[in-house]
Image (cartoon, helix red, strand yellow):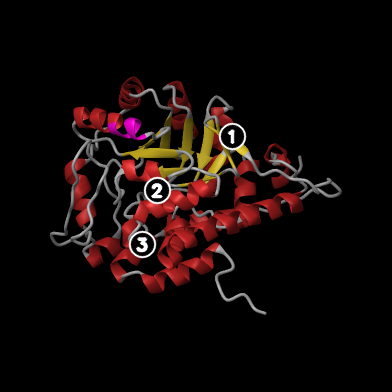
């Protein structure tokens, strides 16, 4: 008997594409400019080799870990991605249910199409909130109160998007939200919608509403404005990672926005070891960008990361089969990670160490 459904995360992409409009697929799949970084994010993980151990007794294994003090079933979280209702009418609620049921955490995007209160109510595990800083700090402060009251457990500040990247597929398609969808969480109350005026409606919207003038002082402002742990998302360089730690953040997220901002920025895997070395366990280090296999997760942890995030695969599962598709994405990746641990000779996450990338 043959398997009729997808066997891995990439096969879900092809299934998702058949269920999405051309504009929605272009938004989810596209990157900036020539999409060099988009491609390199995936390819870099594949270039690394795993130097597995033998005779290591992996009959009993645990994939569990702790991130920001929260116990997770394995070291993979859902990255913040926008506009889930383009993929399925239940949108971010379906993603939250499937993700937390899998024993891990979801980072809800500021550009969610479902209210944060609905998402946290549907979740059975941690929901974190991704923040784009608003030009008006008073509005940002009120938004923080809203997400705190909703039960979000950390703030993930995106810092790699002072202006919007050149996403040509969005310009070509004149990307905008359908009339029945709105951005539900960019303001402390009420909603916002946008349409295209000849180019990408999203780029026009962000140019008007989001703050390109962020500085390190704003991270300190954020620390004073919330009691929640802060994660800085968009780190590429060791010196910036050190500055983030000095600013008192709980984690740094090595990310290039999925190849959607500065094209020809390095693949996240290529800069991860240097960032981990610079942070020196003074904060957690997370990484996203092109992670598609359980072996990729092993390589990230062996490089020093505490956790990885996946973004597009969640949307593929949601577009293909709704909540059940997201659940299947999590099941596939967990099984791959557990199998890779066993084949590498690791019975627990703390046994995934640097020598797996090459004994010294």
Q: Which residue is mark 2?
A: 257
Q: Residue furthest right?
A: 55
Q: How far apart are the alpha carbons under marks 1 and 2?
A: 24 Å
Task: Please identify the quadrant where the N terminus is shown.
Answer: bottom right
Q: Residue at x 18, y 47 (%)?
A: 192
- Label 2 environment density (alpha carbons within 10 Å; few <14, some 14–19, many ≥20): many
User: Horizontally, is 324 left or right of 27 in the view?
Assistant: right
Mark linked to residue 348: none
* Element assignment for label 3: loop
Q: Which residue is mark 3?
A: 88
For residue 308, what is the image quadrant?
top right
Magenta highlight: main SS: helix
The answer to whether residue 225 shows anywhere in this view is: yes
**N-term-proximal mark, 1 vs 2:** 1
Of the two numbered discs 1 and 3 in the rendering, the one whose residue sits closer to the viewer: 3
- Label 1 environment density (alpha carbons within 10 Å; few <14, some 14–19, many ≥20): few
Q: Which residue is mark 1?
A: 66
> Which of these two is toward me, 301 or 33?
301
Residue 82, x across and y down, in percent? 33, 52
Of the two numbered discs 1 and 2 in the rendering, the one whose residue sits closer to the viewer: 1
Q: Relative to residue 170, is residue 122 depicted above or below?
A: above
Magenta part of the protein: which range? 146-150
**N-term-proximal mark, 1 vs 3:** 1
* Element assignment for label 2: helix
């Amino acid at each position: 008997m043959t398997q009729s459904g997808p066997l891995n995360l990439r096969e879900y992409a092809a299934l998702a594409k058949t269920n999405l409009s051309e504009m929605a697929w272009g938004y989810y799949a596209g990157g900036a400019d020539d999409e060099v970084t988009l491609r390199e994010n995936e390819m870099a993980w594949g270039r690394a080799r795993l130097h597995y151990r033998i005779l290591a007794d992996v009959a009993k294994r645990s994939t569990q870990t702790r991130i920001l003090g929260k116990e997770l079933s394995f070291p993979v979280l859902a990255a913040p991605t926008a506009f889930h209702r383009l993929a399925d009418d239940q949108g971010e609620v379906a993603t939250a249910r499937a993700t937390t049921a899998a024993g891990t955490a979801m980072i809800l995007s500021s550009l969610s199409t479902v209210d944060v209160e609905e998402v946290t109510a549907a979740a059975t595990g941690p929901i974190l909130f991704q923040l784009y800083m608003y030009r008006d700090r008073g509005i940002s402060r009120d938004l923080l109160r809203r997400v705190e009251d909703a039960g979000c457990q950390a703030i993930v500040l995106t810092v790699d998007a002072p202006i919007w990247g050149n996403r040509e597929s969005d310009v070509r398609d004149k990307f905008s939200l359908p009339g029945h969808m709105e951005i539900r969480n960019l303001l402390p109350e009420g909603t916002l919608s946008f349409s295209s005026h000849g180019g990408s409606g999203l780029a026009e919207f962000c140019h008007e509403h989001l703050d390109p003038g962020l500085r390190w002082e704003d991270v300190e402002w954020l620390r004073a404005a919330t009691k929640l742990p802060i994660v800085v998302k968009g780190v590429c360089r060791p010196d910036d990672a050190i500055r983030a730690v000095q600013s008192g953040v709980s984690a740094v997220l090595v990310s290039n926005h999925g190849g959607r901002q500065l094209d020809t920025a390095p693949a996240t895997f290529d800069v991860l070891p240097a960032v981990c070395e610079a942070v020196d366990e003074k904060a957690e280090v997370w990484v996203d960008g092109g992670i598609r296999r359980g072996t990729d997760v092993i390589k990230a942890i062996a490089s020093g990361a505490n956790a990885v995030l996946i973004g597009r695969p969640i949307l593929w599962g949601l577009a293909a089969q709704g909540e059940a598709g997201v659940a299947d994405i999590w099941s596939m990746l967990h099984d791959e990670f557990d199998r890779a641990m066993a084949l590498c000779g690791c019975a627990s996450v703390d046994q995934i160490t640097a020598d797996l990338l090459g004994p010294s």
